[in-house]
Image: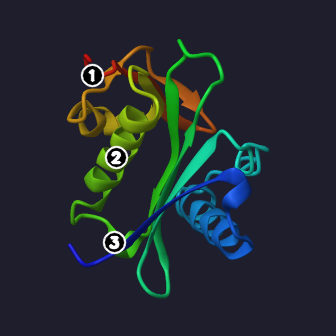
Amino acid sequence: MEAYDWRWSTGPTLDPRGLYDLLALREAIFVVEQRCPYPELDGRDLLPSTHHLEVRTPDTLVATLRLLVPATLDEPVAIGRVAIHADHRGGGLGHALLRAALTRIETHWPGRDARLSAQAHLQRYYGRHGFVPTSEVYREDGIPHVDMHRAAAPR
């Protein structure tokens, strides 16, 4: 895997370029590549409780995800908006990205479970990281999805 710069930020600490880059990458993948028009701007990216991971080469944002951290301690942290540039897929970056998110959750919010809404064909992929389905397959924006949950590591 080539060398990447891994950077975490919270909503208020995102610089304008970083915000633009992550929105552009997510739009390129979810709206254009997957042909799924949906409201990308949901008002959560700039919240203080939202954590963003940016993975960059010197000139390009190649991957991103966000963590939505509920104020209620018994609610799981939501992993979402997982996006990897097409030129950087297939080399293990997605697994490294997910491991980084899980490490962040375990470090900053020990004892908190994690959840995500996965595209249905990725159930086995997320299953390798301890996620199990918690819903039947449903359609979201025309794409089959399934809710998945991962229990916190025992302390």
Helix, strand or loop under label 2: helix
In this picture, is 93 found above or below 4? Answer: above
Nearer to the camera, 26 or 144: 26
Query: Is the C terminus in the top left, top right, bottom left or bottom right quadrant?
Result: top left
Residue that badge 1 annotates: 153
Closest to the camera, between mark 3 and mark 1, is: 1
Helix, strand or loop under label 1: loop
Q: Residue at x 73, y 55 (%)?
A: 12
Q: Residue at x 76, y 51 (%)?
A: 41
Helix, strand or loop under label 3: helix
Is disc 1 surrounded by few (<14), some (14 to 19) or many (20+) residues within 10 Å?
few
In this picture, is 3 found above or below 75? Answer: below
Marks 2 and 3 in Cβ contact (< 8 Å):
no
Res. 91 mark: none
Q: Residue at x 60, y 65 (%)?
A: 22
Res. 98 mark: 2
- For marks 2 and 1, give the CA distance: 15 Å
Residue that badge 3 annotates: 88
Provide residue 73's location: percent of width, then percent of height. Answer: 56, 16
Is disc 2 surrounded by few (<14), some (14 to 19) or many (20+) residues within 10 Å?
some
